[in-house]
Image (cartoon, rainbow, N blue to C red):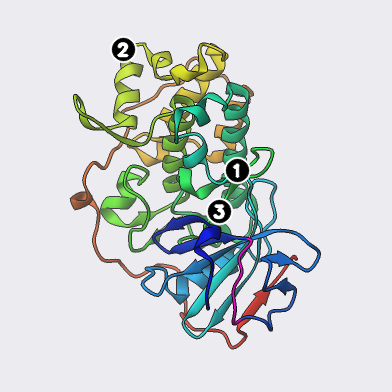
Amino acid sequence: MGFSSSNKIGEGGFGSVYKDATWVGVDSVVGLNPMQGRLQDGRLVAVKVLSGESKQGDREFISEIASMANVRHENLVKVHGGCIDGGCRMLVYEYMENNNLAQTLLGEEKNREKFSWKARVEVAIGIARALAFIHEEVKPHIVHRDIKATNILLDGNFCPKVSDFGLSKLFPDNVTHLSTRVAGTLGYLAPEYAISGHLTRKSDVYSFGVLLLEIVSGRSAIDFDLELGEHFLVEKAWVMYKADGLLQLVDPLLNNSFSQREALTFLKVGLSCVQETCRLRPHMSTAVRMMRDEIDTDGLDISRPGLITSITDVKIGGGRSSQSSRSHTPSPRFYWFGL
């Protein structure tokens, strides 16, 4: 199977993503024009092709399809289907014109300058709504496990779409936590999960808190400069909060064109989501209400954040999940749904 490198629009640990993909070897796929990378009705798609060396195995691949097969929300990326054909595995998504949040907001300054405060508010609330939906409304509940800027895609109107559910876990109503191998990205990992493998929905809440701080500040979760060395956004935000100078964290490229009250609220919500004590973090539906000013945050009592600063602190190897699962390759090669 071959794809043109000129059409590559992204690359991660699991493989590459292509737009207008031209490939060979899947002519029998129903509903897809293999020469143009479009559905038969003309809609453009993005195709994630897992590399042969990918860390994402069949279990994670099938998990992504299973998690998203019947889940629809305006802030979740739509997965049209997937394919397992021998050593080839690929997922077909709706195409997102403005790539991901890391490239758009945390990329070059010229991109950040175009990202107004209003746009940041809408993106942040959209992500929060998507997480509240999969945590609290979808049955069984879904924990994403890898919320970060590169996994937030932006459509032509900069509407955010949470993507990449390859590491997600399903939580039936009677399951409050899972003991599982640690997966995710340093800087976004909830400390209790990173250290013990104890996964709850509050693990995603922590990751969202880091992401919210990034959106408001325009800074990365982990940054480096010659004077400060490696430093962590969560730590910097906490120091500013204790010094009553939290607004200094707001992205200077906004040139004071933002609501100070709203920015302060968002920063407080971010810090409340990354508190070291898991039970003190809000549920995502509560975070949405705070961001919409439906819950007063003026008297919000925020405790010290948790932080994992070294990969050596992360649990290596995995416990057995408390939710039983079977790993097998289903007999059909192609999976299409909700085209």
Frontmost residue, 279 versus 107: 107
**Residue 198 shown left or right of residue 299 in the figure:** left
Q: Reply above or below: 247 against 90.
A: above
Which numbered tag is attached to residue 163? 3
Decide: is 169 above or below 308: below
Where is mark 2, residue-wise?
243
Mark 3: few/some/many CA within 10 Å (<14, 14-19, 20+)? many
Q: Nearer the viewer, mark 2 or mark 1?
A: 1
- Give the vertical position of 57 relative to 38 (above or below): below
Are there few (<14), some (14-19), or many (20+) residues within 10 Å of tag 1? some
The earlier-in-sequence mark between 3 and 2 is 3
Q: In the image, is residue 221 part of the stretch drawn in magenta? A: no
Rendered image: mark on residue 98: 1
Q: Nearer the viewer, residue 102 or 200?
A: 102
Seen from the viewer's position, the closer of residues 220 and 337 is 220
The residue shown at (81%, 64%) is 41
- Which numbered disc covers residue 186? none
What amino acid type is highlighted by mark number 2? Ala
Where is residue 231? Give x, y as percent. 25, 32
Magenta segment, prevailing SS (helix, strand or loop): loop
Q: Which residues are magenta?
A: 20-25
In the structure shown, which secondary structural element does the residue marked by tag 3 occupy?
Answer: loop
